[in-house]
Amino acid sequence: MKHRHDGGQTGATLLELLTVVAVVGIGAAMATPGLFGVLERTRTRQEIQALEDEIREARALARAEMRPATVTIEEGDLVIRVEGGETRTYALGDRILQTTFDDGVAALVFNANGGVDARDPVRLRAETRRGDRFTFVVYPAIGMVRLE
């Protein structure tokens, strides 16, 4: 920066200003990919959380209605059916590619007490577009849903 000692104006030269702009631009270009990755992971986590909430809602519906509630995966949607009652469908979102039950289980059925009629925990696996894998475990008898 040039300084005048004779009482004139001081300031930055055009070259100094362009250098600062270039440095800020390079820093922004380096930070942008990381920022987009963080945003994508946050959105994916929100969809996984929504899936977990919907499974918990099926359990709550079974207990509230005192009737079994069945959770199935149909054409990329999570479907909750309460026996003799309503059916709710939830889109799994565009970030969740595949959702399946383990061990050949076709559906998750919560009984009227909110438990699951199974000997072993039932696992629901979800895979995201980024290749992240999540597993929800539903424990028999108590019907507790937990992200593994």
Image: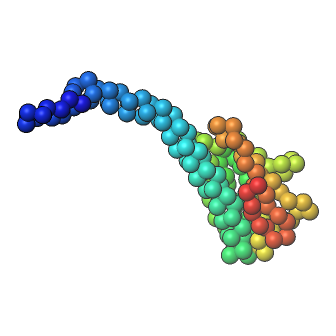
Q: Examine the image and state in which quarter residue 83 appears.
A: bottom right
Q: Examine the image and state in which quarter residue 97 appears.
A: top right
Q: State whether residue 89 appears in this view.
A: no
Q: Residue at x 64, y 37 (%)?
A: 129
Q: Residue at x 69, y 41 (%)?
A: 132
Say above or below: 58 vs 73: below
Q: Examine the image and state in which quarter residue 84 appears.
A: bottom right
Of the pair 77 and 1, the residue shown nearer to us: 1
Q: Residue at x 53, y 37 (%)?
A: 34
Q: Residue at x 72, y 67 (%)?
A: 59
View extreme (front): residue = 5
Quadrant of the image containing the N terminus = top left
Of the pair 77 and 136, the residue shown nearer to us: 136
Colour treatment of the image: rainbow
Q: State whether residue 5 appears in this view.
A: yes
Say above or below: 79 vs 32: below
View extreme (left): residue = 7
Q: Is residue 32 left or right of residue 83?
A: left
Of the pair 48 and 31, the residue shown nearer to us: 31
> Residue 22, percent across and down?
35, 27
Of the pair 130 and 60, the residue shown nearer to us: 130
